[in-house]
Image (cartoon, rainbow, N blue to C red):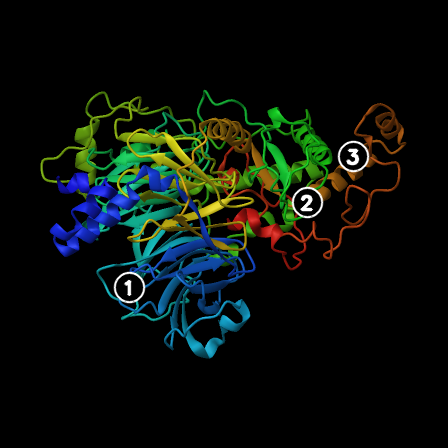
């Protein structure tokens, strides 16, 4: 029997084990266990670890699979021994917001961890003492600052830092990527900290827009793939990195692979990218979309031509685009559309009870009427017309952390003639500001490109010009290997080997996907399940209920058929094939997939705002209507004939403080009002040009509670 067949047959591996080379025998047995469909369908929870006091956004194994590290919204790191479930150490970091990624540093005896968070800080944590026997108490495992050394790197220009990756072949060196459109490489043998507000010395790659995911090849470590917020996956060779000659000094990749769509009218941000073990394929999970398997043997496309085409620049409006409308809104902390009990609106009434809520939800009918009220007033006839900038270039956003959140807190946002003008001007400014990162790279190459530039057609000569442009930028493929011949918009996507459908990825900033052995693919979902697909066919062969809300991360064990998962629940779960028999319910899976498909479409047109923002807007509406109708006649008419009259203008004087839906003052002590004003929109919908609600009113900033930050962290 061939070695390839042994990797897929547990029984034959055991039978031939004594007759094989020791190393090969173990490798084949381990691979056959992961490639066994029977083992996958026997997966059940082996242990649940209660390690944190917040959502667990990241979990990762060490190289040997004996320990795993986890990071949470509580800003703590925890190192846990998987076999015993004992916490080896738990430490409070200097992160101020949600920890998005945490990994063991190689060549450190698992004593060093690198992590990054939502405020853009990267921290290298080195524990100074060897791990003890461990404890089950999170408080007993907590160590003070004298037990570890924390080195801070705060050199990302602005925004969140989404991922960190140790360099496997270089000691004490790591990569980080973030919203400032850079991948930074830090060699701690040269710099052990960096807190410069403007720092260029660690810039490794400069991308056209935010870098939200990346991965280093498992064997040829010089290969690096990144996913950007313009929905394009870019492949680099770190031995051949050179900046372009344009003013942005973009680092052009070897090749680029766009999301398989002719156009993108919103951002489909990659939340996870993984190389396959043979480095011939890459797995890409897109927010608001599906999981794709790209073939890296495909020659790909020129990144410059993809940007020039305008097909993957959502902020550049096209002639065939419909007039944008305000999306539907949801309250921050309303997780009723997640978890195993979530059902699409077409399948249930407005007053369906949603089980498993971390906090009792507001009445769904009230939420819907509030959203409808704001939807009507922002799309009323008094809405000012959109102003097109034409060919006038937009001002470049100031790249400093202190100004990254200033667009919604400007005093001018509340000094207009009416509340509506202020809200809409804030929306327009946010939309235009977000356009700069996309349009500047295009305008640098083609200054005459307008915001309504039609798609580019290269008429068969695109590959020649693209290859020339790529070579002139200092990055090219193999000698004599042309870039793929193409015309825009693209109509064929032959680099897509498989599409994995059925899950839902919309509500969280991080959503992991991974390979399970050679034959399966896994991903978390907003429905609280882990989906397992067959790699060759794309068919769902198993779903696992793993969270009461959202599954963020799924990490397989390096060698054994074990895996760990984490999500909105405050724990980490260890899975193993311990079921008495293989179980799979195709009917229940089909129903779950249909529901996810409907809810994914609904979520694309919904954004999240704090309750305080909604209440402020309604209070402004009350005052506006009172000023427009001082005699109260219109208000009386509204109360007489409008079934939602309790949400419209009252006859009493307008409130001078934020009021809730029962006309009670909202204070910082109110849990629904304790919200972060710098995170007023869902992360993916905020990137939608037709759904850019951000900071319409300047608010006081009470200490945010955990629930108010969930939509931004995760």
Earlier-in-chain disc, 2 versus 1 = 1
Q: Secondary structure at mark 1?
A: loop
Of tags 3 and 1, the one toward the viewer is: 1
Give the residue displayed 30% in from the left and 49% down from the top: 215
Q: Is residue 6 visible?
A: yes
In the depicted structure, whether residue 692 falls above or below residue 333 = above
Identity of the residue furthest to the left in this view: 480
> Residue at 35% across / 70% down in the picture?
111
How packed mark 1 is, by other alpha carbons closer than 10 Å (few <14, some 14-19, many 20 or more), is many
The residue that disc 2 covers is 611
- What percent of the width, then of the height, locates residue 77? 46, 64
Q: Is residue 207 above or below residue 702?
A: above
- Which image quarter: residue 603? top right
- 298 w.r.t. 139: above or below: above
Residue 526 at x, y = what percent? 51, 40
Q: Which residue is mark 1?
A: 106
State left or right for residue 288 relative to residue 61.
right
Disc 3 marks which residue? 647
Total residue callouts? 3
Q: Which mark is residue 274?
A: none
């Amino acid at each position: 029997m061939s070695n390839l067949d042994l990797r897929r047959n547990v029984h034959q591996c055991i039978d031939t084990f004594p007759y094989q080379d020791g190393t090969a025998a173990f490798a084949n047995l381990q691979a056959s266990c992961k490639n066994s469909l029977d083992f996958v369908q026997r997966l059940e929870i082996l242990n649940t670890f209660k390690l944190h006091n917040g959502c667990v956004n990241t979990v990762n194994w060490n190289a040997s699979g004996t320990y795993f590290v986890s990071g949470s919204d509580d800003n703590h790191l925890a190192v846990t021994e998987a076999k015993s479930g004992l916490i080896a150490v738990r430490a409070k970091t200097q992160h101020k917001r949600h920890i998005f990624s945490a990994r063991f540093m190689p060549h450190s005896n698992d004593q060093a961890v690198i992590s990054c968070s939502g405020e853009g800080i990267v921290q290298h944590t080195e524990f100074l003492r060897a791990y003890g026997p461990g404890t089950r108490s999170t408080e007993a495992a907590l160590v003070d600052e004298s037990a570890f050394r924390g080195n801070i790197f705060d050199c990302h220009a602005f925004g969140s830092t989404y991922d960190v990756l140790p360099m496997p072949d270089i000691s004490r060196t790591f990569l980080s990527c973030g919203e400032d459109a850079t991948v930074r490489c830090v060699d701690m043998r040269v710099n052990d900290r960096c807190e410069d507000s403007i720092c260029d010395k660690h810039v490794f790659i400069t991308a056209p827009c935010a870098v939200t995911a990346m991965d280093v090849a498992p064997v040829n470590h010089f290969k690096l793939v990144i996913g950007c917020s313009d929905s394009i996956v870019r492949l680099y060779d770190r031995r051949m990195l050179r900046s372009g000659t344009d003013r942005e000094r973009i680092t052009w990749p070897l090749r680029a692979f766009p999301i398989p769509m002719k156009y993108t009218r919103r951002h489909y941000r990659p939340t996870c990218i993984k190389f396959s073990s043979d480095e011939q394929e890459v797995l890409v999970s897109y927010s608001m979309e599906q999981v794709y398997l790209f073939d890296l043997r495909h020659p790909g496309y020129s990144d410059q031509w993809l940007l020039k085409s305008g097909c993957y620049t959502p902020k550049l409006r096209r002639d065939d685009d419909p007039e944008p409308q305000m999306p539907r809104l949801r309250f921050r902390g309303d997780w009723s559309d997640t978890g195993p009990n979530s059902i699409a609106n077409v399948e249930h009434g407005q007053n369906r009870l949603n089980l498993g809520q971390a906090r009792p939800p507001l009445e769904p009918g009230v939420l819907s009427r509030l959203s409808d009220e704001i939807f009507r007033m922002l799309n009323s006839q008094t809405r000012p017309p959109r102003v097109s900038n034409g060919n006038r270039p937009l001002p470049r956003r100031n790249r400093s952390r202190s100004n990254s959140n200033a667009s919604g807190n400007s005093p001018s946002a509340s000094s207009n003639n009416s509340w509506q003008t202020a809200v809409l001007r804030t929306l327009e400014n946010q939309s235009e500001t977000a356009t700069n990162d996309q349009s500047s790279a295009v305008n640098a190459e083609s200054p005459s490109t307008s915001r309504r530039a039609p798609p580019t057609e290269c008429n068969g000569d695109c590959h020649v010009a693209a290859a020339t442009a790529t070579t002139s930028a200092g990055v090219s493929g193999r000698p004599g290997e042309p870039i793929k011949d193409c015309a825009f918009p693209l109509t064929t996507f032959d680099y897509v080997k498989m599409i994995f459908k059925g899950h839902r990825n919309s509500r969280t900033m991080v959503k992991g996907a991974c390979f399970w052995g050679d034959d399966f693919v896994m991903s978390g979902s907003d429905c609280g399940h882990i989906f397992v697909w067959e790699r060759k066919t794309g068919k769902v062969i198993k779903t696992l209920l793993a969270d009461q809300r959202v599954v963020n991360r799924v990490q397989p064990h390096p060698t054994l058929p074990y895996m760990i998962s984490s999500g909105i629940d405050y724990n980490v779960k260890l899975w193993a094939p311990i079921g008495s028999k293989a179980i799979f319910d195709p009917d229940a899976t089909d129903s779950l997939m249909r529901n996810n498909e409907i809810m994914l479409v609904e979520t694309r047109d919904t954004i999240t705002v704090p309750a305080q923002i909604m209440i402020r807007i309604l209070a402004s509406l009350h005052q506006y209507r009172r000023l427009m109708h001082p005699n109260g006649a219109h208000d009386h008419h509204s109360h007489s004939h409008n079934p939602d009259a309790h949400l419209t203008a009252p006859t009493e004087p307008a409130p001078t403080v934020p009021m809730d839906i029962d006309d009670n003052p909202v204070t910082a002590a109110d849990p629904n009002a304790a919200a972060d004003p710098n995170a007023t929109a869902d992360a993916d919908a905020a990137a939608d040009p037709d759904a850019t609600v951000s900071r319409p009113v300047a608010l006081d900033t009470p200490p945010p509670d955990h629930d108010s930050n969930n939509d931004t962290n995760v």
